[in-house]
Amino acid sequence: MAEIQVGVLANYTARELAERAADHIMVLSKPHAVCIDQRGRVTLELYDDAVFEDVVGVYSREPGLLRVYANVRDDLVDAIAERGIVADTSHRRVRGAERKAA
């Protein structure tokens, strides 16, 4: 199975990424690894397919949505801090309300 793109730290907060990851985990039949690379890209992958250095943790749906979310959130925040991952917001898209009129 291919990796599931959860999001990028430049576009979402760690809490939002954890929520998105937990939502995906709840519909997967097998436990999956939440991974974050040095660019802040968060994915879900089967543990055997994941790059070991990118793995934040391995999660299954059994504990329920709230517990999975809390575990992913806490582990993701810790991994970001420990690895020194900084969100690159230089390419962040400008949303409608932030655009300036010509």
Image: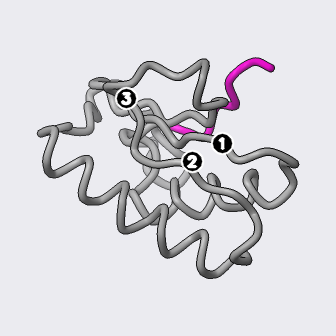
Q: Nearer the viewer, residue 66 or 52?
A: 52
Question: Mark number for residue 96?
Answer: 2
Tell me the quadrant of the picture where the C terminus can be found.
top left
Q: Amino acid at mark 3?
A: Asp
Q: Quick check: 20 above or below 49?
A: below
Q: Nearer the viewer, mark 2 or mark 1?
A: 1
Q: Residue at x 80, y 20 (%)?
A: 1
Circle nearer the N terminus (1, 3): 1
Q: Amino acid at mark 1?
A: His
Circle nearer the N terminus (2, 1): 1
Q: Quick check: 59 above or below 89?
A: below
Name the residue at the bottom extreme. 66
Q: Which residue is mark 1?
A: 32
Q: Which segment is the magenta one?
A: 1-7
Question: Mark number for residue 54?
Answer: 3
Residue 38: x and y, percent? 27, 25
Q: Nearer the viewer, residue 16 or 47?
A: 47
Q: From the viewer's perspective, tell me whether residue 74 is left or right of residue 66.
A: left
Q: Residue at x 52, y 59 (%)?
A: 18
